[in-house]
Image (tube, rainbow, N blue to C red):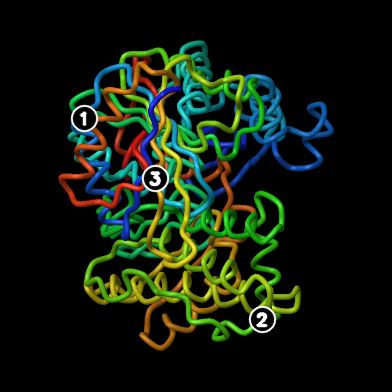
């Protein structure tokens, strides 16, 4: 079983603080798949990641354009599969060039088209909580045990910020 | 007389048009209209239309044939360089380069957002610069100061979701299908815009930026929290209150922008410019601030190539031509 980490943030700025730290640790070729309902915080998380990756441009939702490309310390591809339905449509946007290229790829609604899932990725899912409308549960889980080390370091980052760890196993 | 053939493929629509002197539309073909679907074989689905290759040649042919002109009668080729979807833009740019090379005419690159502004130029000869432009569409929400045609300064834009996107996402959440922004607006017409006090994000931020992600979340939270008591009868009020929250901020910032730059003209552009509430509230606020307000008819609000040809006219006058080595620019800013 690959390691998984569940933690809680109580505000958008806490989510972005963690994302910024994670962004600072990403390497060329990394793929991060973000999943969660509308308004769960996927774009907010990406804005934090981008900051950590040294992107100075304004990062906004790619729902309409499907792909936004940025240039920070590495090329960064921000994909959003919300409007896509089939593998064929994924092929039209040329997803393999992003997934298996030289940049860092962040994919919102990344699990939507299962046939297009990359071999190796770090998954982050976002869940709302019942009691507080600003807090979110974030669950980090890699596609394989290869990511255990990265998840351990995310756990350490979360502890540094003082986030509540719900599960670390 | 300057005749420009323009090609637009930045998003879902494949479009071509011929415009004379920036204002006289000789033809304007958009391959997402129903009759064209029939002519070009079946309905163009959301993403298949992104593979613009299938329809671009017949669309260009149609745009030229309607005018009765030969390629040799054209003065220049124009094309949308960006912003937009990389795979979509590249089709238009490659096609425009090929035609420009074959007919030995200059090639002009136009910014899609600049094109939206020219929907107003096409329709309203009385629009004069300097002016403030509010561009709202599926992918963009921004306020620009237009010192002169061709001279732009972005005053502010959305920090997260665009307005059209927020409409479509809330519509989908409410079960109105996707894209359902227009259905949501229709539903809002019979609702009370003051029924629910959704947040007016960035209203007092002192700048000209927008943020719609928080409003989207607030609407979703409201519906989730009141799931048991909400019935279909409440939907018009929810839609109207949501729409009012978006419109209020855009109206307030547009008027403030006009005052801050001391200009007497405001124009609205982009796909969401078709929204009735946005039009009527901007009209009211402009009137009471003594600002002239213009917006284009619906057919010119949505993506089309006539607006690109119109914008290209000014590039032509400045001899702002591209070499055939040019590439599309998916992240192009205004």
Q: Horizontal and vertical percent for residue B56?
A: 64, 24
Element type where label 2 sits in the image: loop
Separation of disc 3 and disc 2 at Cα? 36 Å
Residue closer to the observer: A149 or A109: A149
Q: Is residue B236 above or below residue B75?
A: below
Determine which quarter of the picture holds residue A87: top right
Residue lying at 45% horizontally and 67% vertically, measured from the top left: A131
Determine which quarter of the picture holds residue B202: bottom left
Disc marking residue B191: 2
Q: Horizontal and vertical percent for residue B317?
A: 34, 39
Residue closer to the observer: A34 or A90: A34
Q: Can residue A11 be seen?
A: yes
Q: Is residue B244 above or below residue B106?
A: below
Q: Disc 2 sits on a residue from what chain? A: B
Q: Is residue B107 above or below residue B269?
A: above
Q: Disc 3 sits on a residue from what chain? A: A
The residue pinned by badge 3 equals: A138
Q: Disc 1 sits on a residue from what chain? A: A
Residue closer to the observer: A30 or B140: A30
Q: Residues within 10 Å of mark 1 (few under 14, many from 20)?
A: some
Q: Horizontal and vertical percent for residue B120?
A: 49, 58
Q: Residues within 10 Å of mark 2 (few under 14, many from 20)?
A: some
The residue pinned by badge 1 equals: A72
Residue lying at 19% horizontally and 52% vertically, measured from the top left: A162
Q: Nearer the viewer, mark 3 or mark 2?
A: 3
Element type where label 1 sits in the image: loop
Residue lying at 42% horizontally and 80% vertically, measured from the top left: B286
Separation of disc 3 and disc 1 at Cα? 25 Å
Element type where label 3 sits in the image: strand
């Amino acid at each position: 079983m690959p390691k998984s980490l569940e933690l809680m943030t109580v505000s958008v700025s806490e989510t972005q603080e963690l994302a910024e730290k994670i962004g600072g640790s990403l390497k060329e070729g990394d793929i991060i798949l973000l999943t969660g309902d509308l308004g769960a915080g996927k774009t907010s998380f990406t804005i934090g990641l981008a900051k950590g990756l040294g992107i100075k441009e304004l990062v906004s939702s790619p729902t309409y354009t499907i792909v936004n490309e940025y240039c920070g310390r590495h090329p960064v591809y921000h994909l959003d599969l919300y409007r896509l339905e089939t593998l064929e449509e994924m092929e039209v946007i040329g997803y393999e060039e992003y997934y298996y290229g030289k940049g860092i790829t962040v994919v919102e609604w990344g699990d939507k088209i299962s046939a297009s899932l990359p071999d190796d990725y770090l998954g982050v899912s976002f869940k709302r909580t019942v009691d507080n409308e600003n807090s979110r549960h974030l669950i980090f889980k890699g596609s394989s045990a290869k990511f255990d080390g990265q998840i351990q370091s995310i756990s350490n980052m979360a502890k540094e910020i003082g986030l509540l760890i719900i599960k670390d196993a | 007389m300057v005749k420009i053939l323009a090609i637009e493929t930045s998003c879902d629509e494949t479009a071509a048009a011929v415009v004379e002197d920036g204002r006289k539309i000789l033809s304007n073909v958009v391959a997402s209209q129903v009759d064209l679907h029939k002519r070009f074989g079946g309905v163009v689905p959301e993403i298949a239309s992104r593979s613009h290759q299938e329809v671009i040649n017949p669309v260009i042919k149609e745009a030229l044939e309607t005018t009765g002109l030969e390629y040799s009668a054209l003065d220049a080729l124009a094309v949308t360089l960006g912003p937009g979807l990389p795979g979509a833009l590249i089709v238009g740019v490659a096609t425009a380069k090929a035609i420009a090379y074959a007919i030995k005419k200059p090639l002009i690159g136009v910014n899609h957002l600049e094109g939206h502004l020219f929907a107003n130029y096409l329709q309203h000869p009385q629009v004069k610069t300097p002016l403030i432009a509010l561009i709202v569409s599926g992918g963009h929400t921004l306020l620009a100061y237009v010192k002169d045609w061709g001279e732009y300064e972005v005053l502010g834009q959305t920090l997260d979701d665009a307005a059209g996107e927020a409409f479509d996402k809330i519509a989908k959440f409410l079960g109105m299908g996707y894209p359902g922004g227009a259905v949501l607006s229709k539903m809002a017409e019979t609702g009370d815009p003051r029924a629910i006090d959704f947040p007016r994000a960035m209203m007092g931020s002192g700048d000209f930026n927008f943020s719609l992600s928080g409003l989207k979340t607030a609407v979703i939270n409201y519906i989730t929290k009141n799931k048991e008591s909400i019935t279909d009868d409440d939907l018009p009020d929810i839609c109207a209150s949501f729409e009012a929250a978006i419109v209020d901020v855009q109206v307030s910032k547009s008027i403030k922008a006009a005052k801050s730059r001391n200009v007497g003209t405001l124009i609205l552009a982009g796909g969401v410019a078709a929204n009735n509430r946005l039009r009527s509230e901007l009209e009211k606020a402009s009137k009471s601030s003594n600002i002239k307000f213009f917006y284009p008819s619906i057919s010119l609000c949505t993506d089309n190539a006539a607006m690109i040809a119109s914008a290209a006219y000014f590039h032509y006058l400045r001899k702002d031509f591209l070499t055939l080595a040019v590439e599309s620019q998916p992240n192009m800013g205004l």
